[in-house]
């Protein structure tokens, strides 16, 4: 174990044992890798007591407490594990065991889910139930550091020059051992590369037909694409971020104008319950003529959810849609109104992009209709079609899946130029938290606002914002509901139940004259419960001052906590809000390491000419009980 730990220094402060139990009742000795007979209830000693008529567990024997409060009745020996309320269960959530060469983990529904086939890494499944290698240590820790990922070049606008601007993954190696990284699609190896200890590799991957540019302006359907995702594996734990596209300025001095990025989550932390986040459709018109059903210059683009199958066995998916959804081009589901449910099955590597339905042409009778200002080029009106917003859609699957929220290209706010691609990988509901802190992502010498989208997974959720925005400091949400908040200063968000918080950057024309740089971008915020003390992350080489670009870190810390960035004390202008301090710090391109005396939150973001990106620089993904 000491040899393996040396391969993954980042894990040493986090791993308490090779086999972990997140929460819950006693771990069966079999699942802990101990060969021992199953204990029986045994004699009741004088110290035993219980609540009369209440169910309970003694080891993994389920019982009902006797009327005397000192005896056990209706005893039942459990094969997998014992839960006081549920009785005998198949397994204890958070425990590991081997199924041949496959390491499996018990999920929150007491079902064994495959983590990794150790034999593919030339390893074995050990007595602790995890693979006997450095990747197994990362799987026990549950963070964004791992050995298997599923990059996918999600839907962007067809107008993007896909020859000049490529899709890339950035792989950072936080450990002390060289990483061998392999990327494949449909079983065929696309790329193999080595990443040195502490190093970073930028890997260009082809756009994928049917995935990358499937939605025509004003006319589209949802789409499912076989082998629409890449599979990335590494010999040791790494960190992976995808950029869609990577560059925003080309050698010919033109610009992409439509970028975003996602921190990818490794396979071992994926889940079966997610809630979508996106934005209203892009919907504008030009030279509106009420006698013309389709004005020549109308333009609409959809928001969408993307679901990727990652298991060797087929995965059944069910989505309760929060907005009107376009039919699947292949016939797997019909056009469905908000509140309805769509169902489909995904093979490994298959990508479903569930697009919002095509809204009506933007016209005075449509929601949010606003005439453009006289000096706004090529636009006469904007519409806000909330009926076609997929934020709050519930994604259920019988096996773990990767889920993204995204948008082909949209204005934020809906009536501010210019549109930009959005994407972010969504964390499973079981990892959501209740405490967040943030401030607007912007150039520090500006005072522009950002938007928050806060989505609930449970009925009876109360969200408190401090300081309160103009819209009010407390919001009540039911399951699947969300609220959109505009804010222009540092803020804390606390919730009575776990929530998902997305932050959206705004368009460059939010001011007059326009900002020097920036445009819509989207990332989920990391709850304080999932903050880390140690981060390794990579900033892209494309956002440079020479091309009017700059990358930043948004940092949240305990007041006065010592932080080092690349071995030097982090100097910043801190803003106090609640029990946190926040700062925005410019960071150059390349690989970086940040360490802190106490857990901190990090969001990486970058601004360019009419474009931006944003993603969490890292996070833990522990299961958080409600």
Image (spheres, grey):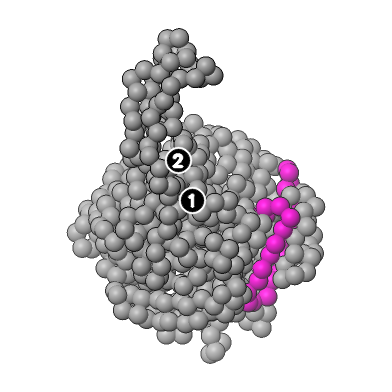
How far across and how far down the image is residue 546, in percent? Answer: 66, 83
How far across and how far down the image is residue 581, in percent? Answer: 74, 51
The image's mark for residue 414 is none
Marks 1 and 2 sit apart, C-alpha to C-alpha, by 10 Å
- Residue 369 lies, with reference to residue 165, above or below; the image says above
Is residue 296 visible to the viewer in this orientation of the structure? no
From the viewer's side, name the closer residue of 212 and 33: 33
Residue 57, image quadrant: top left
Which residue does the numbered mark 1 point to in the structure image? 19
How far across and how far down the image is residue 579, in percent? Answer: 73, 44
Instruction: Give the class, few, some or many, for how many residues have Cα within 10 Å of label 1's Cα (few <14, many ≥20).
Output: many
Quadrant where the N terminus is found in the figure = bottom right
Is residue 341 visible to the viewer in this orientation of the structure? yes
Q: Is residue 592 magenta?
A: yes
Magenta residues (range):
577-601
Taking the image as shown, residue 570 lies to the left or right of residue 137, namely right
| CB atoms of marks 1 and 2 within 8 Å | yes
Which residue does the numbered mark 2 point to in the structure image? 27
* Secondary structure mainly formed by the magenta segment: strand
Residue sticking out furthest to the bottom: 252
Residue 570, image quadrant: bottom right
Q: Does the magenta stretch include residue 211?
A: no
Residue sticking out furthest to the top: 68
């Amino acid at each position: 174990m000491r040899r393996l730990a040396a391969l993954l220094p980042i894990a040493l402060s986090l791993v308490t044992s090779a086999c972990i139990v997140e929460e819950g009742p006693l771990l069966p000795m079999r699942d802990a890798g101990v060969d021992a007979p199953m204990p029986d209830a045994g004699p009741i000693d004088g110290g035993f007591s219980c609540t009369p008529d209440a169910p309970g567990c003694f080891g993994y024997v389920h019982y009902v407490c006797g009327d005397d409060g000192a005896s056990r009745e209706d005893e039942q020996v459990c094969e997998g594990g014992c839960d006081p309320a549920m009785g005998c269960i198949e397994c204890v959530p958070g425990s590991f065991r081997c199924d041949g060469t496959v390491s499996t983990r018990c999920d929150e529904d007491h079902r064994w889910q495959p983590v990794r086939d150790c034999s593919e890494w030339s390893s074995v499944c050990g007595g602790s139930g995890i693979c006997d290698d450095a990747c197994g240590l990362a799987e026990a820790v549950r963070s964004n550091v791992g050995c298997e990922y599923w990059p996918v070049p999600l839907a962007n606008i067809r107008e993007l020059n896909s020859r000049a601007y490529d899709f890339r993954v950035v792989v950072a190696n936080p450990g002390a051992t060289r990483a061998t990284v392999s990327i494949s699609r449909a079983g065929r190896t696309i790329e193999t590369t080595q990443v040195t200890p502490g190093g970073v590799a930028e890997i260009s991957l082809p756009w994928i037909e049917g995935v990358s540019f499937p939605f025509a302006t004003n006319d589209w359907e949802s789409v499912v694409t076989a082998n629409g995702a890449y599979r990335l594996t590494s010999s040791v734990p790494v960190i992976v971020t995808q950029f869609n596209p990577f560059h925003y300025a080309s050698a010919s001095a033109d610009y992409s104008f439509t970028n975003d990025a996602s921190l990818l989550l490794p396979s071992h932390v994926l889940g079966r319950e997610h809630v979508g986040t996106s934005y209203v459709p892009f919907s504008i018109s030009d030279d509106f003529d009420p006698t013309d059903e389709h004005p020549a210059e109308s333009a609409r683009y959809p928001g969408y959810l993307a679901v990727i199958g990652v298991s060797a066995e087929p995965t059944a998916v069910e989505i309760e849609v929060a907005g009107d959804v376009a039919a699947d081009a292949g016939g797997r589901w019909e056009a469905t109104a908000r509140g309805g449910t769509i169902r489909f099955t995904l093979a490994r590597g298959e990508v479903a992009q569930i697009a919002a339905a095509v809204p009506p042409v933007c016209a005075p009778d449509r929601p949010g209709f606003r005439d453009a200002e006289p000096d706004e080029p090529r636009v006469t009106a904007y519409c806000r079609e909330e009926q076609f917003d997929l934020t709050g859609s519930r994604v259920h699957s019988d096996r773990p899946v990767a889920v993204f929220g995204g948008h082909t290209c949209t204005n934020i706010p809906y009536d501010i130029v210019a549109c930009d691609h959005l994407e972010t990988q969504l964390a499973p509901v079981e990892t959501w938290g209740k405490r967040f802190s943030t401030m607007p992502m912007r150039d520090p010498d500006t005072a522009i606002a950002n938007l928050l989208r806060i989505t609930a997974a449970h009925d009876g959720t109360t969200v408190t914002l401090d300081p309160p925005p103009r819209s009010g400091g407390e919001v009540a949400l039911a399951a699947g509901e969300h609220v959109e908040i505009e804010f222009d200063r540092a803020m804390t968000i606390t919730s009575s139940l776990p929530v998902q918080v997305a932050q959206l950057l705004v368009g460059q024309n939010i001011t007059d004259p326009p900002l020097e740089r920036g445009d819509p971008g989207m990332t989920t915020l990391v709850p304080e419960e999932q903050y880390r003390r140690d981060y390794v992350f990579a900033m892209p080489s494309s956002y440079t001052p020479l091309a009017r670009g700059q990358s930043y870190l948004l940092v949240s810390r305990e007041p006065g906590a010592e932080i080092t960035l690349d071995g030097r004390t982090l100097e910043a202008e801190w803003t106090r809000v609640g029990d946190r301090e926040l700062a925005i710090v410019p960071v150059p391109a390349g690989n970086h390491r940040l360490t802190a005396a106490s857990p901190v939150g990090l969001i990486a973001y970058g601004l360019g000419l009419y474009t931006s990106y944003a993603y969490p620089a890292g996070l833990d993904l522990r299961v958080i009980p409600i």
